[in-house]
């Protein structure tokens, strides 16, 4: 049996852990997906979001940033009623706002990927934590990313959300040193 990070105990966490978490992502569509999902997760468990991930794909046009940027208040009214996502109006409005800001970042930096990865000099940081409780909730880099995203008009991008985003998209490798994914 494979030794995994202690949070990956059950489905869908084990599949997510084994196939996505900490693997560097450079695709703007997937980066936008994680930006939405991490914002939606604020105050909730990641399992809650993973269990609704397909609902988010459908509700947010397969994470088509241009389509989401054009959502109106009629879309918001429908999304607030959608049982397949977190029906928090602030988080829904944030996703739409962040789509608009995401497009601005793409225009300014060539891609969201180029912008985001610049915070780690375009190279993943490999941490050496022995157990899950050693992992920080946020770092100096996630604080800088949070401040810069807010300066660019993003919402639901505090330092903790930004660090979770960094972990999800592989900007940092926080697999614990006893995890089989740590050595990869």
Image (tube, rainbow, N blue to C red):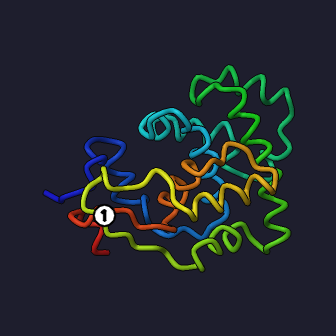
Seen in the picture, residue 75 relative to 41 is either above or below; the reply is: above
* Viewer-proximal residue among 78 and 98: 98
Q: Residue at x 38, y 62 (%)?
A: 174
**x and y, in percent, of residue 168 in the image:** 49, 57
Given the current orientation, which residue lies at the most extreme left position?
A: 1
Left or right of 113? Residue 151 is right
State which quarter of the image contains the N terminus: bottom left
Q: Residue at x 74, y 24 (%)?
A: 78
The crowding category of the residue bearing disc 1, from other C-alpha atoms within 10 Å (few below 14, some 14 to 19, many at least 20), is: some
* Viewer-proximal residue among 63 and 100: 100
Given the current orientation, which residue lies at the most extreme top position?
A: 81
Q: Residue at x 71, y 27 (%)?
A: 79
Seen in the picture, residue 178 relative to 65 is either above or below; the reply is: below
The residue that disc 1 covers is 129
**x and y, in percent, of residue 85 in the image:** 59, 30
Left or right of 147? Residue 143 is left
Q: Residue at x 53, y 56 (%)?
A: 163
Query: Which quadrant would residue 22 be assigned to in this image?
Result: bottom left
* Viewer-proximal residue among 145 and 50: 145
State which quarter of the image contains the C terminus: bottom left
**x and y, in percent, of residue 69 in the image:** 82, 47
Q: At numbered mark 1, what does the secondary structure look like: helix, strand or loop? A: loop
The number of callouts visible is 1
Seen in the picture, residue 142 relative to 7 is either above or below; the reply is: below
Left or right of 44? Residue 142 is right
């Amino acid at each position: 049996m494979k030794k995994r990070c202690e949070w990956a105990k059950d489905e869908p966490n084990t599949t997510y852990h084994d196939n996505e978490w900490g693997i560097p992502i450079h695709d703007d569509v997937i980066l936008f997906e994680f930006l939405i999902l991490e914002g939606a997760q604020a105050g909730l468990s990641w399992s809650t979001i993973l269990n609704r991930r397909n609902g988010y794909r459908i509700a947010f046009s397969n994470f088509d940033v241009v389509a989401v940027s054009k959502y109106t208040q009629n879309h918001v009214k429908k999304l607030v009623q959608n049982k397949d996502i977190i029906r928090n109006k602030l988080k829904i409005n944030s996703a739409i706002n962040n789509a608009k800001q995401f497009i601005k970042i793409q225009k300014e930096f060539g891609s969201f990927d180029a912008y985001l990865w610049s915070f780690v000099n375009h190279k993943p940081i490999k941490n050496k934590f022995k157990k899950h409780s050693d992992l920080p909730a946020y770092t100096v880099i996630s604080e800088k990313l949070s401040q810069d995203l807010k300066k660019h008009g993003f919402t639901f991008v505090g330092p903790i959300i930004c660090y979770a985003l960094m972990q999800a998209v592989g900007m940092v490798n926080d697999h614990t040193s006893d995890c089989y994914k740590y050595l990869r």
